[in-house]
Image: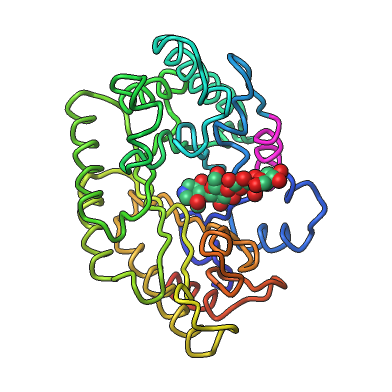
Amino acid sequence: ATTLKAAVTFPIGMIVSADRLSGNDNNFTTVLNKEFNSVTAENDMKMASMFTAPNTYDFSKGDAIVAYAKANGIRVHGHALVWHSSIPNWLKNYAGTDAEFEAQVKGYVKATVAHFALAKTAAGKPVVESWDVVNEAFTDGAYAAAFYKRIPNYLVKCFTWAREADPTVKLFYNDYNLESQGSKVTEVVNMVNSFKANSTPIDGIGLQMHVDYVTTSMSTLAANLTTIKNTGLLIHFSELDMTVNIYKDLTTLTTERSNAQKAKYKEIAVLYKTIPAAQRFGITFWGMRDSESWLLSFHNNSNEWPLLFDANYGYKPAYNGFLEGLNQQ
Ligand code: G3I
């Protein structure tokens, strides 16, 4: 096949914003519609964007994304209901009791999931098929956040509330460094096992896949993926991108570095296909053009080229490598 989405039976995703889809960037939507059949909101469907005041929600940007997806036959993956890095200021500083704090979070999770469950395709399928219910719960930052401190058993509760609001939407736990950090994989698998033992709902695991062209070990990634795969849950490569210049040794992307990136994108596509078909939820890229990646500001480096398309929407060797991997029999 000659496009990403036509090459495989599982969805290929891209991050979007309501602004990007509003009609002022035809280049973006042309590539989006040609290559991708799943979208995740980069920021518009996070708690800090939607939970504007106590018992008050603004779903307008998410609704615009859902309307675009519905009109174009694209799936929406919801991201992210509860994340320590996306708490609205009013809730961070919430002066109520812990029980009142919990009631706010519960109300928000249930209202948000119920709202987005309403959108259906012409065939009656939900447009928003899934949610990252909790994002990045196993780091120091997360342990320090209000959810851990103020809501006993908050992981179990968030998944339970989401399921109460929608009996069929797929519920994901999403995290970074699962490709590299065995201790975090253990924490996630322990969580899944304890959920299963207590009938707490969970359908899938998202490995963010913010990888590097050389420091990310493919053998460690493969081993961790096997451990996660053995849970039997759906697996989403949820935020794929690949740095090539973390040591800032380049000022332009060389052919050599570009080819190394191409080769590793191919390996990642091939690796994903080792997951049993019934567990493949899809692969989502965290950005279309290199110039727009969050990694440029994160590493304070404008000379970083982590994605499949260059600043002019040109197809990079990385794209060809990934497509080759998808097409490989
Ligand atoms: O929109 C405002 C703008 O009005 C304001 O002038 C500007 C000043 O800082 O901020 C803008 O908002 C920023 C927003 O991105 C849009 O650019 C936020 O400050 C900034 O925090 C936000 O960063 C996002 C980050 O998550 C935090 O929510 C990144 O775009 C987004 O790529 C990143 O994505 C995360 C995933 O959700 C979870 N996994 C890691 C991944 C990368 O950090």
Q: Residue 63: within the magenta?
A: yes
Q: Quadrant of residue 317?
A: bottom right
Relative to 264, say whether 196 is above or below: above
Tell me how the rendering is colored. rainbow
Left or right of 267 on screen, residue 45: right
- Given residues 70 and 110, the one toward you in this image is 110
Could you tell me which residue is drawn at 29 percent across and 55 percent down? 276
Q: What is the magenta range?
A: 60-72
Residue 268 visible? The answer is yes
Relative to 94, say whether 189 is above or below: below
Left or right of 295 on screen, residue 68: right
Q: Quadrant of residue 136?
A: top left
Relative to 84, say whether 318 is above or below: below
Where residue 158 appears, x then y in whole percent? 38, 25
Could you tell me which residue is drawn at 19 percent across and 39 percent down? 190
Residue 38 visible? The answer is no
Picture quarter with the N terminus: bottom right
Where residue 269 appears, x then y in whole percent? 41, 68
Q: Quadrant of residue 54?
A: top right
Could you tell me which residue is drawn at 25 percent across and 43 percent down? 188
- Given residues 10 and 16, the one toward you in this image is 16
Where residue 275 appears, x then y in whole percent? 30, 58
Picture quarter with the C terminus: bottom left
Where residue 292 appears, x then y in whole percent? 64, 62
Relative to 54, say whether 300 is above or below: below
